Image: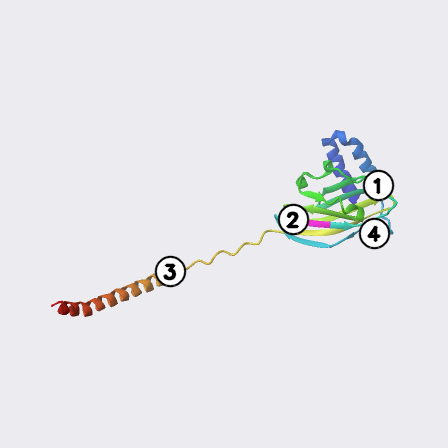
Amino acid sequence: MRGLYLLKSVRSHDSRHPREEMICSILVIFILTSCVCGSFVVNVTQSWYHAEENHNISLEWMFPTSTDHSTNALYVSCEILADQIPLVLFVLHEGVEVPEFQDERFAGRVQWDKDVLREGRLRLHISRLQTNDSGLYWCQVDTSYGKNYKECHLNVTEVKDRPEPERTSDTSLRGRIGLYCVLGILGLAAALLVVSLFFPALQRKDL
């Protein structure tokens, strides 16, 4: 069933990119002839991923490597099932990325680490996450010595609302203004009292 998802996507993209007909044909053959081999196991570092929108995330798959084979014999197809709609996330053909088959929603948002591929690790970085990126992700790895796939889930949530700064209520504000007025009046009264007490004494001294 997963192969049929990618097959539909390949056909739709083939009409948009006629120059890629040869690569498309090779991918179709790869899909139709793919099978699951029990001795070849694909794993994920996490089964569930959680992230907030506008953040970045890295998904990683691991598969067996062989010193007798190079990455030129490596084929990878990664898809996402979001809202029951399959979308092509990443395609690797003979160790070379084929962005023509990637769904336009992920254009420029998916990067991969070439250095760790020889170690049997497929690491995809998805940037600027959107809530509709939530869904079931799977990658199928096909080599000359085995093939298999593994799934994981990604849940992207909306950014949590930041708490608003506390607002001083009108009643509290009025109370503070009243307190300041009372203190001001008391201060003025004290100043007048001091003047009334000492001013006559100063007048008598002058006389």
Does residue 177 lie above or below 12 as drawn? below
What's the amino acid at mark 2?
A: Asn
Going from N to C along the chain, the mark reached first, 1 or 2, is: 2
Say which amino acid is labelled 1: Ala
The CA span between labels 1 and 2 is 30 Å
- Label 2 element class: loop
Q: Mark number for residue 41? A: 4
From the viewer's perspective, is 68 left or right of 169? right
Residue with the mark numbered 2: 56
Q: Could you say where residue 45 lies in the image, as x and y percent from the top left?
A: 75, 54
Q: Rate crowding at label 1 as few (under 14), some (14 to 19) or many (20 or more) other CA atoms within 10 Å.
A: few
The residue stretch that appears in magenta: 55-59
Q: Count the labels in the image.
A: 4
Of labels 1 and 3, earlier in sequence is 1
Location of residue 30 in the rendering, given as x and y in whole percent from the top left corner:
83, 39
The residue where tag 3 is placed is 173
Task: Residue at 71%, 52% (x, y): give it.
Answer: 153
Q: Residue at x 86, y 49 (%)?
A: 37
Residue 134 visible, this angle:
no
